[in-house]
Image (spheres, rainbow, N blue to C red):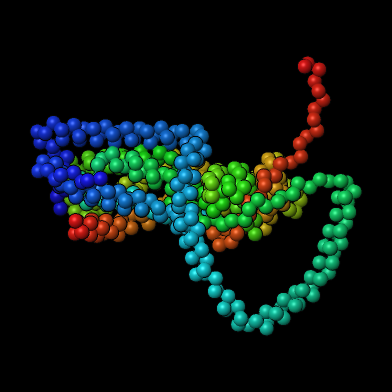
Amino acid sequence: MAPPIARRTGFSRRAQYGVFIGYVAAATGVLVGAVLVLLSMFNPLAFAALRSGVAELTTPISSGLHGLRRAATVPGGLTDYFGGADKIRDLRQQLEAERAIVMRARMINRENARLRALLRVRDVDAAPVVTARLVNSSGSSTRRFATLNAGRFQGVEVGQPVRGPEGLIGRVLETGLNASRVLLIIDAESIVPVRRTRDGFPAIAAGRGDGSLDIRSAGSVNAPFLAGDVFVTSGTGGIYPPNIPVARVNAQARDAALARPFADPDALDFAVVQKAFLPPLPPPPTPDAGK
Amino acid sequence: MRPPRPSKFGEPVSARRRSLIAAAVVMAGSLLPIVPVVAVVPFLPPLGLLFLVAWRQRSPDVLPVWAGAPLGLWDDLLSGHPLGSAMSLWTLVMLSIDLIDHRLVWRDFWQEWLVAGGAVAGFLIGARLAGTPLRAHVDTVLLFQIAISVALYPLAAAFCAWVDERGQQRR
């Protein structure tokens, strides 16, 4: 088909100016957009108010759709009834086998509490701020943001960590009144200080952008990582409280290893927003004599 | 507000309505990321851009050449790309299609599909360069996303044509 030619204006001055002004407006749009991109590059949190304003409108819709999705996927446990007796027998055996371990863990726990009381360690409680759900995400972008259906009214603040039942999900980046934006740990700009559960070896879990994490050693060079190494948050940096599971290493590597995160942000489960973990302040310096 | 008196020299009254319908369809397409899925990799197509290109190629006067800027701004607020990327890239897409229209007098659907593919690939790659650090491992997934989006263009074009015809009938 031949394209209809609309921009042919004839002799009408008005129509000619109209077309010209249209092109000027388009060029202005390109330039303004480029300037906005540059501003967003240098200050990613600029225009957060605009985004959260739109999120206020769309998040209730997403929450409703998310509820429908949950309702549609709940009756999946029907097949669990088949072979139930065998399963119960297996679980009983497992319980017997692990009784000794549980007894020992209880003793260690009591011992630990006694020693802590002796040392007068002040625990920073990771009290949950609010329990909400991740209802949608930036599914068409290469960045990994998710929208949490709770905001400032529910006490959510910028910088608070978000975790699921299995492990760390991310942290709050922008807050609106009833919705907030969460940077997932799998985003390419997310960095989480972690330590290995086995020996407390410090490392950094950086997102790759494709759903997995890069674990890099924080201190020593030539550090070996074994397949199955489990990493939890270390509390360094003051955002993430310690001991939240983050990721498990896939394959043996040195210095930097590929790891799979524990938490599945799409798991239709609750996301718990916690208070930002602030390590205890260092002792106050001696008042300097200069003043 | 009273509609303006129809004049022989002005545009037909329904043209404005048609433009508004087109803009509404594009804005609704930009709402795709609010589906209740927390994506681990980018897989949703930029549906707003697909609709925009489809409307623009259906007829050049339904959306003005600067319409890419406001519609792109709306898309930026929802998509997670850095603010302004769709605003400038969508306007560039509109300008490029304008240029192509001047060069290419006769075109059929295959050429329109090719143009749409170029627009989608240009936008997604541009937004990736603007928003995500270069070291991120997102490029393979991005290729799949581009392929999905290009494959969806005929559906988007058919949908726009259907909406357009419905809108014209009800006048």
Of B122 and A281, the residue lying toward us? A281
User: Residue at the spot x=62%, y=56% of the render?
Assistant: A131
Q: Quadrant of the C terminus of chain A?
A: top right
Of B18 and A107, the residue lying toward us? B18
Furthest residue toward front: B2
Q: Is residue A115 left or right of residue A2?
A: right
Residue A68, x across and y down, in percent: 48, 65
Residue B163, x across and y down, in percent: 26, 58
Q: Is residue A96 left or right of residue A203?
A: right
Furthest residue toward right: A118
User: Residue at the spot x=35%, y=38% of the render?
Assistant: B88
User: Residue at the spot x=85%, y=54% of the render?
Assistant: A113
Asked whether residue A255 is in view, the answer is no
Of B29 and A41, the residue lying toward us? B29
User: Residue at the spot x=38%, y=36% of the render?
Assistant: A33
Residue B75, x across and y down, in percent: 39, 46
Residue A194, x across and y down, in percent: 68, 47
